[in-house]
Amino acid sequence: MRLVRLLPPPVLQSAPRMASPQPSPQPRLTLFDLPLDVITLPATLDRLGEWMFRAPRAPHTVVTLNPEFIVQSRTHPEFVQAIQEADLVTADGVGIVWAARQLHGREVPRAPGYDIVKGLMERHGADLRVFFLGAKPGVAEQAAQNAVRDYGIQVAGVHHGYFDLPEDRRVAELVGSSQAHLVLTGMGAGRQETFNQYWRQVLGAPVIIGCGGVIDVFAGTADLAPAWTRKLGVEFIWRVGLDRRRWNRAPRLAQFVRLVQAEKRRAGGR
Ligand code: UDP
């Protein structure tokens, strides 16, 4: 996985230091060294609306945590750091809800990435300037056109997600000059979170969210999981089961279950 440079090259040493996140007003749990905010979808939309339209303009990063992030981050310290430094970390699906129940005995509501992005577009419509960053060339343009048609949002800019690390600064500056309220970064798990966190001051937008395949869904190049799976929070069954390209991810989900069970045993034995 290509995330972010391990050692910052000299030019990046002058990159603005990331501000430490403000304390969250909602309770925060810890899952495998990663934070998880106990926050509902409507409260998430309120909070992001506050950052975009009412608070003094300052960058905030949002992570929608899923089991693959937990498995992947265990071997990628920079991914862990990006999640730890995020301003808001929501539960993307039922896997995280289950883990929180197992390890903390807490019910954590879900606030999935797609629902957050759609909810913001529905709430703020023409007031919202969105930058679509990610997916294959042409897809972000299509997603932006569809979002204008369906929600009347303003498009701050578009850029595909297939660029190499030396181009990060150029792309971050392009986004930073767009005056977006909302930056959707869909460049794959890990890469999108580390990019967002490392460049947050340059990106500058009040809400910068890593959103996986959401740009493809808006573009119509990937289907949204059926409503029943989303309602139950088990989209991964549909995604992994029916999409041949995702079959290699099933072992990671099994690994996640084993990790949670081992952690539960360990905590029980203390
Ligand atoms: N993607 C990208 N750049 C990359 C890798 C992936 O823009 O270098 C995009 C990909 O086209 C898709 C999104 O990131 O739109 C999510 O990709 P994928 O489902 O492979 O990643 P996941 O987040 O599920 O690991």
Image: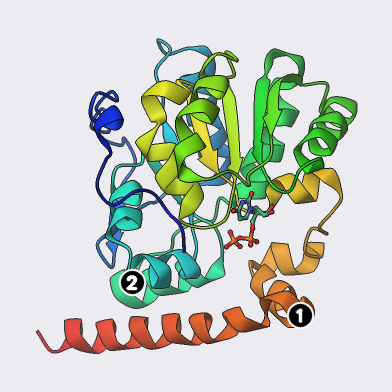
Return the mark for residue 105. 2
Q: Residue at x 26, y 41 (%)?
A: 8
Q: Residue furthest right?
A: 149
Say few, some or many: other residues with alpha carbon within 10 Å of mark 2 (under 14 / 14 to 19 / 20 or more): few
Q: Which residue is mark 1?
A: 244
Give the residue at x 19% y 86%: 266
Quarter-of-image position of residue 250 = bottom right
Q: Depth check: 184 or 28 in front? A: 184
Task: Report x, y in % for residue 225.
Answer: 77, 64
User: How many angstroms separate mark 2 from mark 1 (CA)?
Assistant: 35 Å
Residue 231 visible to the viewer: yes
Which secondary structure, mark 2? Answer: loop
Residue 18 visible in the displayed image = no
| Residue 6 versus residue 196 in the image, above or below | below
Q: Is mark 2 within 8 Å of ligand 1?
A: no
Kindly identify the residue that appears in the image at 50 percent across and 81 percent down.
Answer: 252
Q: Quadrant of ligand 1?
A: bottom right
Q: Nearer the viewer, residue 95 or 214?
A: 214
The residue lying at 54 percent from left, 56 percent from top is 110
Q: Position of residue 182 (x, y in %)?
A: 58, 26
Is 116 displayed left or right of 167 in the figure? right
Q: Quadrant of the C terminus?
A: bottom left
